[in-house]
Image (tube, rainbow, N blue to C red):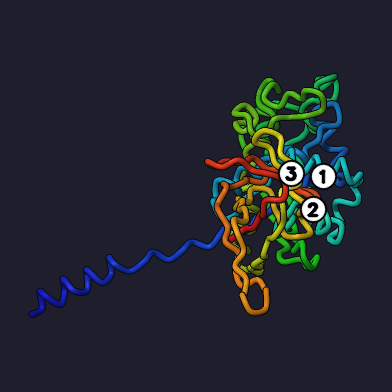
Amino acid sequence: MFRKIQLLLLTTVLAMPATAQAPKKRVAILDFDYATVHTYVSSIWGTNVDVGKGVADLLVEKMVNSGVYSVIERKAIDKILAEQNFSNSDRTDASTAAKIGKILGVDAIVMGSITQFGRDDKQTNIGGAALGGVRSRFGIGGVGLKSAKAVVALTARMVNTNTAEILAAVTAQGESKRSGTGLLGAGGSSGTAVGGVVDMKSTNFASSILGEAVNAATASLATQLGSSAARLPTTVVQVNGMVADVSGDTLILNVGSKAGVRVGDQLKIMRENRSIKDPATGRVLRRVEDAVGTVRITEVDEASAVGKFSGAGKPQVKDTVRNN
């Protein structure tokens, strides 16, 4: 009898439908502001380097790898920022960030600042004359110190794009210490700046003590922001629109971010076959539709969206578009 109960329970469990996994919340990460550390950054590389972009790129990579959020690509963000002509100062404002996020069709925007970036050494004197032209390459304090320590401190805020409410405010610090080296390694080549940009995701930079400190700080930020996912409200948006233009497999829709369409959405393309009317009143009782295919959204503005069509049918202008 006990054996039969076990088999019955097992059969019941196997027959139960798997719980549908909730869709990931979508976020966009803006370049970090680095005005506070601008002087120190210039002293390290001898020129202005956009470390705010580098930190944002690292944070994107870590948040994607964590699997908690769906993160919007940089090129989509850059396109919107260019079109809307937002300045760097605008991007640090919560209400402006929310507007950017709404246009992108994301649930939240992450914006942050670099508050510390550089060296914290126990010994800083190897002789001023010996430093010469390399002082600016390796940071104030010189190279080849007995104990060089890199420290990077970051702050970040996650902003609800619907309300401009700050959902999370987090801080993180990364440190790395090594003997007989400078911030960027013994030869300074691991942090070469090309056109004012350093690839912080490169192996060379990551292996330097400055790279290790940056990675530690961004990893901490990603973990803290990941734990804030539950604070983002789940919003169910009903999308109903039409195909406005067809060019090969590229469709333009007459609905955009204002209607809840977001980059990455997959929408159904339907075509009305016939309508069933009440014979007594002539009122439409039901519309019979045929499935044409689907469209995956690649670009969104406030009033329209662009996407790639897939399916057996041939889409036409005035076909219906919806998300369920």
N-terminal label among 3 and 1: 1
Q: Determine the CA span between mark 2 and mark 1.
A: 8 Å
Q: Residue at x 43, y 66 (%)?
A: 19
User: What residue sits right under mark 1 in the picture?
Assistant: 80
Residue 187: image location, x then y, percent: 68, 20
Q: Residue at x 80, y 49 (%)?
A: 301
| SS under mark 1 | helix
Image marks 2 and 1: residues in contact by CB distance under 8 Å: yes
- On screen, residue 85 versus residue 78, left or right, reads right
Label 1: few (<14), some or many (≥20) within 10 Å? Answer: some
Q: Residue at x 83, y 60 (%)?
A: 94
User: What is the quadrant of the N terminus in the image?
Assistant: bottom left
Dot label at residue 103: 2
User: What residue sits right under mark 3 in the picture?
Assistant: 252
Q: Choose mark 2 or mark 3, whichever is in front.
A: 3
Asked if residue 28 is positioned above or below residue 285 in the image, the reply reads above
The foreground one among 60 and 141 is 60
Q: Inspect the image, locate mark 2, and give the three-letter code of the amino acid beneath it.
A: Ile
Q: Inspect the image, locate mark 1, and give the three-letter code of the amino acid beneath it.
A: Ile
Q: Determine the CA span between mark 2 and mark 3.
A: 16 Å
| SS under mark 2 | helix
N-terminal label among 2 and 1: 1
Residue 229: image location, x then y, percent: 61, 63
Q: Choose mark 3 or mark 1, whichever is in front.
A: 3
Q: Determine the CA span between mark 3 and mark 1.
A: 18 Å
Q: Is residue 147 visible?
A: no
Q: Residue at x 57, y 47 (%)?
A: 292
Asked if residue 100 is positioned above or below residue 214 in the image, the reply reads below
